[in-house]
Image (tube, grey):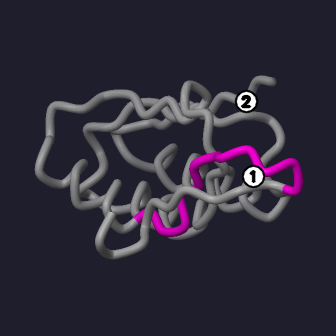
């Protein structure tokens, strides 16, 4: 993407992989698509970064339509903590959030 929120990188074995560097484009898409209920990042064969920004977005009323998110279990512990905070915040509303992790 032109804003570098998604890039294609090469690993040490010279194999290409995608990397989500910034969740800004994802957030813009979700704001423009209010019927989205689930965000499953497990299906992406990419490295997902900037989960903290996404978790902060999930706390806002603009994200209340999203009922669940899923990530690969390999995301950082800090990212998992931020998602847990979002889930806890949403538990105080009428719009609870489910968070799942898997390999």
Residue sticking out furthest to the bottom: 3
Please report the residue visible at 71 percent of the width from the left and 56 percent of the height from the top: 10
Is 7 situated left or right of 10 in this image?
Answer: left
Q: Quadrant for the C terminus, please.
A: top right
- In the image: residue 45, left or right of residue 53: right
Circle 2 crowding by C-alpha within 10 Å: few under 14, some 14–19, many from 20? some
- Residue 80 tag number: 1
Instruction: Identify the image quadrant of residue 94.
Output: top left
Residue at 14% of width from left, 41% of height from top?
34
Front position in the image: 78 or 24: 24
Question: Which image quadrant: the N terminus?
Answer: bottom left
Q: Nearer the viewer, residue 21 or 71?
A: 21
Residue in the image at 62% along x and 52% along y: 48
Name the residue nearer the viewer: 11 or 92: 11
Sequence-wise first label, 1 or 2 = 1
Residue 57 spot, x, y in % from top left? 40, 63
Magenta region: 12-23
Q: Residue at x 43, y 67 (%)?
A: 5
10 magenta-colored: no
- Marks 1,2: beta carbons within 8 A: yes
> Is residue 37 left or right of 75 when viewed as pictured?
left
User: Helix or strand or loop: what does disc 2 sit on?
Assistant: strand
Per the rendering, the mark at residue 91 is none
Say which residue label 2 marks. Answer: 101
């Amino acid at each position: 993407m032109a804003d570098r929120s998604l890039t294609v990188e090469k690993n040490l074995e010279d194999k290409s992989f995608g990397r989500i560097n910034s969740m800004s484009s994802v957030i813009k898409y979700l704001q423009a698509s209010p019927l989205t209920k689930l965000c499953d990042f497990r299906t992406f064969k990419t490295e997902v970064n900037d989960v903290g920004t996404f978790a902060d977005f999930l706390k806002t009323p603009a994200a209340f339509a999203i009922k669940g998110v899923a990530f690969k279990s390999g995301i950082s512990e800090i990212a998992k903590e931020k998602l847990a905070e979002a889930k806890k915040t949403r538990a105080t509303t009428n719009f609870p959030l489910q968070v799942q992790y898997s390999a």
